[in-house]
Structure formats: C-alpha cells, structure tokens
Image: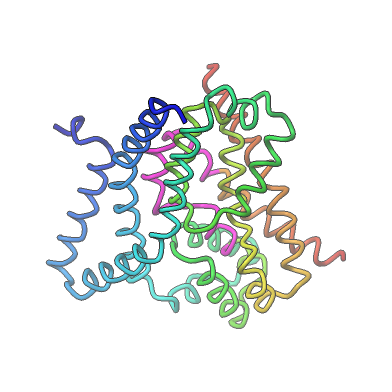
Amino acid sequence: MDSERLRDAGKSLLNNLKMSIPILLGVLLLVGLVNTAVPRAFFTRIFTGSLLLDPFIGAIFGGVAAGNPLTSYVIGGELLKNGISLVAVLAFIVSWVTVGTVQLPAESLMLGRRFALLRNAVSFLMAVLLALATVATLEIV
Amino acid sequence: MIRKLGGGVLFLLVVVILYLVLAVLDFETAQAGFTAFLRLLAGILPVLGIVFSLIFVSNLLLDSRTLVRYLGREAGKRGWLIAVVAGVLSAGPIYLWFPLLSDLQEKGMRPALIAVFLYNRAVKIPLLPVMILYFGLKTVVILTLYMVLFSLLNGYIVEHILQARSKT
C-alpha cells in the first residue's frame, strides 16, 4: 500500500474526527436530556382522539423524541392499548426514526442546512402519509 | 473567535451551557441527563469505531471517481439499491453515520442517495420480532415495504427540490 495514500487517508480521518466528535458529543448530551426530561407517560396524554389531527400530533412528537426505536414500539404499544388510533401510532413510530429534531443541528453542520431541513420536513410529511397508506392497505388486504 | 471555534465546537458549547443552566435550576434532572449521556456514549462506542474505520477504509480505497460510479448520478438503479441495502443494514443511532455520509458527500455521493440511506435506517431487522409482537405481522410487513418505497420517494423529492432551488 502506498504510504502517501495511507497518510492522506489518516489525515482525512483526523479532520473528520475533529469536526464530528464535538457534534456527536453535543447530540448525545441532548438525547440524554430529552430522554430524561420527557417521561414515557407523557406521550399517552398528547393525543386528542381526532382521526385527522392525531397522526400529525404523533409525527410531531415522534420527531421531537429521541432514543432507541425499541422505546417507540413500547410507547406505541401502550398508546394502542389506550385507544389511540393505529394511524397516529404508526405516524409516531415512523417519525421517531426518520425525523430527527434533536440531531438536526448535527445533520445541518455535517450534511448542509438546506439538505437537513428539507429531508426532515419531507420525512415528517411522509410519516403521516406512510401511516395512512399502511392503515388503508390493512383494510383492503 | 466563533468562526475559529467551528460550528461543531460552538454547538457543543451551547449544549454544555444548557446543562449548566439546568444544573442551577434543577440539579437532579441535569445529573440524570448526564448519566443517560454516559450510558449512551458507552453503548455507541463500538459502532462509532466501525463508522470511523469505514471512513478510513473509504478514504483509502475510494477515490471520487469510483464513488461517483457507485453512488453518484451515473450510478443509476444500482446506486439506489446500494443506498437502500446499506441503510437497512447499518446499525446504531442515525447521527453516527453523519460523519461518513459527509465524507461521501464531499466525494460526490448524490443527495437523493444520502436521504434514501438515512430513511432506510427506519427498517430495523433485529427489532422486527418486537415490532411484530406489538403491532402484528401483517402491519409490520406492510409498514416495512412502504418504508422502503417511501425512502425512494423521499430521496427523489429531497434532491428534486434542492436542485430546483439551486437553479433559481
């Protein structure tokens, strides 16, 4: 292996580390805070019972929440048991993994502000549409 | 001074200040948040190691021309397929992959495929059994198929709007 290439690759990795580490630490600190400050029970109180509004509420809070997707499934299961509509719950769990409000500053810094804002906005709308499409398909098949 | 620090350090500084303010107002929550942070950090270290190893290997083996052939505009359907499969298979939190994607973006990876990769991280194969337990097999199969389909749509829309805006 060419030693110059190795050195270049190492230098490039070092630059990437210098840029990424502070951002990753910041995101982890924020995620830790959100996970602590927002108790699971909170999510069962935010829905209105409206079939039209609840998917959007689900997508908003799914996008703001952070953490392991497993947590979103557990909360989703609890929400279903509490009579929240499947559309709202699916919008919530899809938005949880596709929209990242907490990590938006990190995404903006590393991938560009316009890309990050646009990707999250499109993913938010898609969480609602995906939930609607899934429930509609479930009713057909 | 701010420019010298760089956006990342500034961001970290803002979060640290937020913690300090919270510690003054509600020490217990700040402490619990910091404990959660340490737990998260310990959990992601192995994946972080993999991501930075991948960055090193991609720097070593992939030049811009090769990358553009597989993940650039000339990649065609193969590029979309690579982004879907890589997104589904990638592990760990989404933000761990930003450094690698930023690196690939600089080398010429198209925005649509970055968006597709990120969207497909919603498909969590190891967690599918748990998901089935809560929502049922039929729901999970349909939802997963739609996630992959919507990821392609997501990538297409994001890139289309970005291009349209850069033209105006």
Identify whether B122 is placed above or below A80. Answer: above
Q: Nearer the viewer, residue B5 or A138?
A: B5
Is residue A111 placed above or below A5 in the rendered structure? below
Residue B160 or B36: which is nearer the viewer?
B36
Span of residues in magenta: A92-121
Image location of residue A57, percent across then percent down: 53, 62
Q: Tell me what residue is drawn at x 18 percent, y 31 percent.
A: B4
Question: Does the magenta run of residues contain A118?
Answer: yes
Q: Position of residue B146 (x, y in %)?
A: 73, 54
| Snapshot quadrant of residue B68 | top right
At horizontal 24% and vertical 53% (from top left) the residue drawn is: B15
Q: Is residue B62 above or below residue B54?
A: above
Instruction: Give how far across and how far down residue B92 sits, in percent.
Output: 49, 58
Q: Residue furthest top?
A: B167
Residue lying furthest bottom in this view? A81
Residue shown at 47%/31% (left/top)? Answer: A1
Q: Is residue B70 left or right of residue A110?
A: right
